[in-house]
């Protein structure tokens, strides 16, 4: 369904994506994993034809470069940063984007019901919560029933409950035969939604693994997500690796695989290293329940 062949994208002297090749079969779900700056969003924008790149990208045999409009008609896209007219009515927003897509026979009430927004059509967009706005964005992406859905860190701004609800909604969609390509820095989303994981490091595709093999490669049964200021992340990773924890930079902080009996150890190590922790999550790898264990606190 999606064929990415030797794709490279440069911004001046900086190479954001370097010689990436990846094939995604119809109905398959693939997660892009890696720290901020690894090239996930750039690669997604190349797939969408929003930025030019060298190499070749095809969606269902349609070249993104030569037949961009035809390729994009097959894709529903939900970005991380949403852009709505806040004073527009929710049902009006559905009709507006349907017209942009050249769709006429659209029933807003039916569309909203499909993403759990039944009864909200008369509201203004500004009256919706963050999670509801994400559902509205998903409803708009699904207008016309595209066979491919592309998502870029869509739960990054949601709280634990909102993330869990949204991921469960996506789980139903990914099980309905739609091809899914998404970027995420949350292991629970990857474990729930992905069949394979494509790991990007400094713009390169370092490996592609089944979700089970990816979880095994993390080496532990539980994953800690530790959110902390940018300035201390490298020091945190160095401190943890020095005592045997294979910490990795990812998303808004770091991820640390741990065994069930050593979940508290990284907190003691980082406290000794004077690394502040703003927030954390504990996620069972491979059988995660999104948002099931979420805690907030400050390391002292």
Image (cartoon, grey):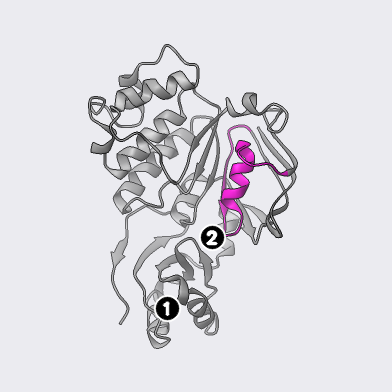
* Residue under pointer 2: 36
Q: Toward which corner of the image does residue 168 lie, by quadrant?
A: top left
Query: First in sequence: mark 2 or mark 1?
Result: 2
Which element is circle 2 on? loop
Q: Which mark is residue 99?
A: none
Which residue does the image show at 52% across and 72% down from the upper left? 247
Q: Quadrant of the N terminus?
A: top right
Tell me: 73 left or right of 19. left
Where is residue 72 shown, x and y percent of the image?
59, 29
Q: Is residue 50 magenta?
A: yes
Residues marked 2 and 1 touching at CB (< 8 Å): no
From the viewer's perspective, is residue 142 above or below residue 289?
Answer: above
Residue furthest to the bottom: 272
Where is residue 234 shown, x and y percent of the image?
52, 76
Where is residue 176 shown, x and y percent of the image?
49, 30
Where is residue 258 shown, x and y percent of the image?
46, 71
Q: Is residue 86 magenta?
A: no
What's the magenta region?
Answer: 26-53
Which residue does the image show at 25% across and 31% down from the upper left? 124
Which mark is nearer the camera, 2 or 1? 2
From the viewer's perspective, is residue 277 above or below residue 73?
Answer: below
* Residue under pointer 1: 266
Q: CA distance from mark 2 to mark 1?
A: 22 Å
Which residue does the image show at 37% across and 84% down from the upper left? 271
Q: Toward which corner of the image does residue 64 lie, by quadrant?
A: top right
From the viewer's perspective, is residue 162 above or below residue 226?
Answer: above
Q: Residues within 10 Å of mark 2 (few under 14, many from 20)?
A: some
Q: Quadrant of the C terminus?
A: bottom left
Of residues 61 and 196, which is closer to you in this image? Answer: 61
């Amino acid at each position: 369904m999606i064929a990415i062949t030797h794709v490279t994208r440069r911004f001046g002297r900086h190479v954001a994506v370097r010689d990436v090749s990846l094939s995604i079969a119809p109905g398959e779900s693939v997660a892009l994993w890696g720290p901020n700056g690894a090239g996930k969003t750039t690669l997604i924008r190349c797939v969408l034809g929003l930025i030019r790149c060298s190499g070749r990208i095809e969606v269902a045999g349609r070249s993104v470069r030569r037949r961009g409009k035809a390729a994009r008609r097959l894709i529903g896209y939900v970005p991380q940063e949403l852009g709505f007219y806040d004073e527009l009515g929710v049902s009006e927003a559905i009709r507006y984007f349907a017209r942009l897509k050249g769709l006429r026979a659209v029933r807003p009430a039916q569309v909203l019901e499909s993403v759990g927004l039944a009864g909200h059509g008369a509201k203004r967009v500004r009256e919706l919560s963050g999670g509801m706005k994400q559902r509205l964005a998903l409803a708009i992406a699904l207008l016309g029933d595209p066979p491919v859905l592309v998502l870029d860190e869509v739960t990054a701004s949601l709280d634990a409950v909102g993330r869990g609800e949204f991921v469960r909604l996506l789980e139903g969609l990914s099980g309905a035969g739609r091809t899914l390509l998404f970027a995420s820095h949350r292991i629970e989303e990857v474990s729930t939604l992905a069949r394979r994981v494509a790991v990007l490091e400094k713009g390169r595709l370092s490996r592609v693994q089944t979700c089970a093999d990816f979880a095994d490669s993390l080496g532990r049964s539980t994953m800690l997500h530790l959110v902390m200021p940018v300035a201390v992340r490298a020091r945190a990773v160095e401190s943890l690796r020095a005592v045997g924890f294979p910490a990795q930079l990812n998303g808004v902080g770091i991820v640390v695989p741990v065994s069930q009996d050593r979940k508290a150890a990284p907190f003691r190590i980082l406290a000794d290293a004077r690394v502040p922790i703003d927030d954390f999550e504990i996620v069972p790898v491979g059988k995660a329940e999104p948002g099931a264990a979420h805690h907030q606190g400050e390391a002292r």
